[in-house]
Each structure stands twice: as C-alpha cells, then as structure tokens.
Amino acid sequence: MKRRTKLSIIAVLLASLVMTACGKESTPSNSDNGKGDVVKIEFFQQQGEEAIQSAYREVIADFSKEYPNIVIDMNTVPDPVKVLTARFATNDIPPLFTDFPTQLQFKEKVKNGFIENLSDQPFIKNVNQKYLDMTPADDGGYYSLPYARNYMAVYYNVDLFEQNSVEIPTTYAEFIEASKVFQSKGITPLYLPLKDVGHIFQATNIAFAPGGVEEMAKVAKGEGQIEGNTVFLEFAKKLRELTEYANKDAFGVSAQMMQEAFANGQAAMIISGSYGRGNIKLANPNLKFGAFPLPNDTADTTTALSGVNASLSISAKAKPEEKEAALTFLKYLARPEVAQKWSDLSGEPSIINGTTYEDKYLQPLLDFIDNGNVHDWMSSTLPSAIVTELYGTTQGYLINNETPEQYLKNIDETIKLNAVK
Amino acid sequence: MASKFLERSTYFLFTLPAVILYTLFFAYAVFVGIQYSFTDWNGISSGYNYVGFSNYVDLWNNPNFKQSLIVTGQYAIMLVAGVMILSLILALSLNSLKKLQTFAKSVYFLPAMISAVTISLIWDQLFVRVVPLIGEAFDIAAFYQSPLAHPKYALIAVVIVNIWQAVALPTLIFIAGLQSVPSELYEAGRIDGASTFNRFRYITFPFLIPTITVNMVLAIKAGITSFDYAYTLTGGGPVKSTNVIGIMIYNDAFQNLRFAMANAEAVILFVIIAVLSFVQIKLGRKGGVH
C-alpha cells in the first residue's frame, strides 16, 4: 500500500512536470501578442575580437532605439567558422550572420541556395565598388553586404622607430637592416606568433612569392609543382630569416599573446591582421603604432594581403519576417554615419562610401592597398582544407629546421593529399 | 494481480525516457553516421552520392590518418598509465590518512569539477609564462620555450594536463574499492607475518581488480576519444604532433568540408574502442574477488 502511494506521488509529479513544460511553450507567444509584433533574430557574428564585438553592440543599441520592434541578438562563439559550418550542415542556419564572401566555402553555400540574394537591394550600392567587385558569387549575384576590408601588414611601434632613428622600410633589405638595428640595441625586432603560424604563412607567402597562390592552385589541379620553384625558394629563405629576428619563444606564442606583447612595447614590429588593431588599442590605448606592407625585394614587387572582411548575409531559409528584420538592419548598417561609428569603434577600415579613416599612421598602408599590388586571402583561390594543412607544413619547416628544398617538396605533397578529387 | 502489473509497468515506464533518449541521440546517430560514411557528402550540399568504401580506402592510404592513430595510441597509453598509477597511489595514501581524510579527498577531487577548457587555458598560460622562467633559471634547454611549442614534448605536456584532471574520479572509485576489503584479512595477514607489499599483493590487489577494470575501461576510452585538451592547448600542432583522431574528425567535418570522410574516421574509432573494451572486460573477468 505504502509503495503504491509513493508510486502515485511520483506519477503525479512527473505529470505536473510534463504539463509545466507544455505551459512554458505557450507563454512567449502570449506576451508577444501583448507587445505587438516584436521580431527577435539571431545575429551570428564571427569576429571574436573585443573591439569589434563592442562596436556591433553599440550600433545594435542605436538600431533598437530607431526600430524597437526588432531585437538583434548578437551571438559570438569561439571557433565560429566551424560552428557556422556545423549549423549549415544541420539546417540550423542563423537568420543573419557574417561570413567571408570571397571564400570558396561561401560560394558553395550560395550554390546550394542557403543564402539570400541581395543584388537588388539599393544599399549594396553604398559599398566601395572595388571591394564589391571581389565578392560576387559564381552566378554574378551579391549575397552579402561587405562592411570592412582587412589586411595583413607590419605594425610598428612609432616611438621605438623614432628613438632609434629607423625609417619605415620599403624593401626587404631595409626591413632586415631595421631589424638588425633593433637587435643590436637589445630590442626584439619582430614578435612572431608561430603557434598560430597560419596568417604569418599567408602574409609572407603573398609578400615574398608573388603569384605563389596561383602556382599552388595549379598543383591542386594536378598541374605543375612547387618543388624547384625559385620564387618559392626565395620565400622559404626569407621566412626562415625572419625567425632569426624574432622572439625566442615564438613557437609557443599565439596571435593574441603577440598583440599583448606589442601593445606593451615588447617588440618593435609584428606581422598582424587588421583584426589585431582593436585588441592592441584595448590593451594599451596610449601606444602609437602604424602599419606598412611587408616589403619584398623592391617596392614594385611588394604585394599586400588584403581582402574583404567578414560580410553580412541573410539566410534564405529564414522566415519572411526574420528576413525583413535582417534586411532592415543591413539597410541601417549601410548608412555612412552608422558605418563611420562602427569603424571608429572597431578600428576596422570601413568600405561603405562616405566614411573616412582617422589614423594618420595607418593611412599610408591603406593608400598602398588602394594603389599598389594587392592579393586576396588564400582561401579565395585554394580550398580551405589545403590552406589550413599548409599551416602545419610551414610549422614543420620552421620547427624541424628542414631545408627550403624539403619544405617545397612538402608543400607539393600537402596540396596533392588535400586536393578535392 | 492488477497492482502487481501496475507496479511492474511503472518500473518499465521509468526506464522509457532513457531508452527513448538513448535511441534518439545515440543509436540513431550512430546508424546515420555509418550511413554517411559511405557517401561523398561535404556537409553543405543538399545532395550526396553513395561511394561505397571509397572513404575507407582513402583513409587507408592517408599518411595523416595513420599518424593520427599513432598519436592517439601514444596519448591513450600515457594517459592510462599515468592515471592508473597515480590514482592508485593517491587512493592508497588518502585511504590511510588518519586525520582530515574527507578534506584531503575533496581537495584532490577539485580538478574534476573544473571544465577541461578552463583547465587547458590555465595550463597554457603556465606553460608559456612559467616554464621558460624555470628553463632559464636552471639552464634546461628543453624548457626554454613552452613545451607545447615543441613537437617532441607537446603530446606529453597535453597528457600531463589531462592526467592532472583525470585522476580525480578513478581515485574516488579506488577508495571505494579499498573500503570493500574486509579488515580481518589484513589482521590475519599481519599475524601471519605478511609484509606491507605482500598484504597489498595478496589481499588488497585481488579485491581491487574489478575496480581496476572499471577504471581501465574509462581511462582507455577517455584516452582514445580525447579531444578537448589537445584542441584547446595546441589545436593539434605543432606539426600535427598532438593531432589526435578527435581533432582530425572535427577538422575534416567542419573545417575541411569532408563530412563523409570524418564519419568514416569516426566509425573506425568506434570499432577500435568497441574491440578494446570487449577485450578489456573479458580479461578483467578472469581474476580477482567479485
């Protein structure tokens, strides 16, 4: 008898649990009715840098004052590229997200009808034409709102350069000369984050091996080889030489630690992405630093890595009201004054027409990007599987002290192994 | 009669949520995963083709996969050895404490309550900021850099971090095992003049064998499926020296857009674990006191 009572009590408890669970589901729709049509959409924002996140947060706060019926819920996660891919794979696509429109992966998503076509939206015309031209999908349509450009460049500590009367180098020889001056004075010339060797590999390869990415793309198609390529041999030697002027613990240092060290004046130069700028400023708002392109043998052969930064896209699978809300937000973002505010807060150079970039130390780099040789990130030409595997190959070259010849052979092998059959 | 039926069916109903959840999230997922491993799905495309065993053949010919299996094996062996030895020593010492036993037990259990990612981030900073200082102070060349920066030491460093956390639970299980040994046996042993080692060898150890089996199975499984420590500490690097199979599966699926290939890797991993667990449990049944 006792047992039965116990069991029935448990049964009642279970039943009430189920009922409360059902009850919960119906609550939000009730409150929605009371408030009017509030649309809440998730905004999957890929850039984790604190400055960029807070810039978006501010702009979203302004937006919600103007559009109280739309709630933009920004979501930034670690390892966002993979998380987003996983969400595409499971058909859980965020209604609004940032992605990289020049990359082959993005084009694959467009091809499968996951992303809304924005070609006919008037705000697309607010984007700097040169950058817009980098983003069309295979069908020629625009599927994202490019919002900023990015680059890999050498950031330099203005004070250290002035104190040691070092000029901004414009050739590779001058760059090494400058490094020697700093080294002789006990200052670390270059702080390298070889734990995160990826972007260093991309920046140095594009700077020191013009046309190198296209060569590697050929290998991926089964034509040609890198082994014996003199341009690549030159690149390999220069990359090795850079490590001679780098911090001793380079292989244990991540990109974020490099930004911190540079912000604290521990090194004269770093090779960093534009995304590092906000973090450096957060770590030390008083640091004076500028940027110049990583120089090759002559100024004419110097190529800077620059591309379109994370751009904003809308899921084609979202509900009509979510799409509408997302479009309203993009329209708002494309206003010059909003883009300007975002650019000022994030430190990212905006590519919305009518914005300016207030940083005299960075302006020379941006001018170079506008007028000089520029190459996009490798993943726009090569499948990202090859690019990321090459990071490991490059780490092996530097850590294991392989010969440049061996490194080139390994590059061939890595590309062939990871090429899509 | 009716009440008996009600009682029985109630117990059955209580298992139902678990059975349903298990079927939904485990059995179904495994089945679908195996199915995908025979396709060429890239994770994004809406369609896919069946390609038979082609993914498995590719893996067989892929040096990175073999290397990854070897790394995983080394990782598992080091983890199992480290965890088993350390947790047994810890359990024996903690069990023999006369004072503050509960307090000491909770201190040693603390790491088990911190998430692996948090632990990895803390250790990463220790490795990169403290180890070079030690290296320079004592002039040990191997410690000039974070051990995570060196292909030779990175795997060991990752395993050490993993062991630091992983000993907690087996220690607790061992303590429970130790407390099941009847104290009369020790007394009898002492009267017969058995040494400390012999008391351990002939009294404690046989009683511990079932516990050892449980802990071994858990540790082997943890070692082979390990992902979080290596991923947060090194991301598989430097030069793939810590590229355990879990990281390879993750990268192939979500970074390299080779979803079907990643599934084939996972299926192979599943088979390896199944075989190892089976052998382990068979062997564990042979000796000991049950």
Image (cartoon, rainbow, N blue to C red):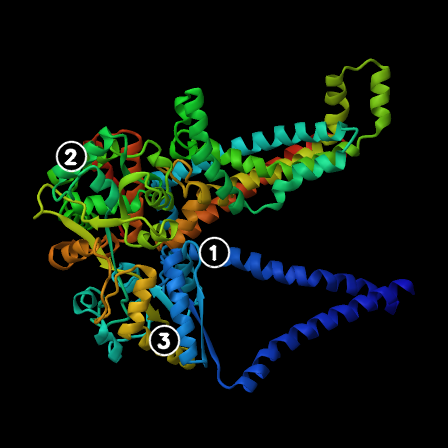
Q: CA distance from mark 3 to mark 1?
A: 38 Å
In terms of image quadrants, where is residue A416? top left
Q: How far across and how far down the image is residue A88, in percent?
A: 40, 64
Disc 3 element: helix
* Chain of residue at mark 1: B
The label on residue B250 is: none
Q: Mark 2: which amino acid?
A: Glu
Q: Mark 1: which amino acid?
A: Gly
Q: Callout 1 environment at 10 Å: few (<14), some (14 to 19), or many (20+)?
A: some
Q: CA distance from mark 2 to mark 3?
A: 49 Å
Disc 2 element: helix
In depth, the one of A297 and B257 nearer the eye is A297
In terms of image quadrants, where is residue A209? top left
Q: What residue sits right under mark 1 in the picture? A: B33
- Point out the frontmost of discs 3 and 1: 3
- Point out the frontmost of discs 2 and 3: 2
Q: What residue sits right under mark 2 in the picture? A: A177
Q: How far across and how far down the image is residue A351, in percent?
A: 23, 66
The residue sitting at 82% across, 13% down in the picture is B193
Please say if B132 is above or below A71.
above
**Tag 2 and tag 3 share a subunit:** yes
Q: Which of pointers 2 and 3 lies earlier in the amino acid sequence?
A: 2
The residue sitting at 40% across, 61% down in the picture is A53
- Point out the frontmost of discs 2 and 1: 2
Q: How far across and how far down the image is residue B207, in percent?
A: 75, 30
Q: Callout 2 environment at 10 Å: few (<14), some (14 to 19), or many (20+)?
A: some
The label on residue A329 is: 3
In depth, the one of A114 and A282 nearer the eye is A282
In depth, the one of A143 and A44 nearer the eye is A44
Q: Mark 3: which amino acid?
A: Phe
The answer to whether residue A293 of the structure is visible from this angle is yes
Q: Are the two marked residues, 2 and 1, in contact with CB atoms closer than 8 angstroms?
A: no
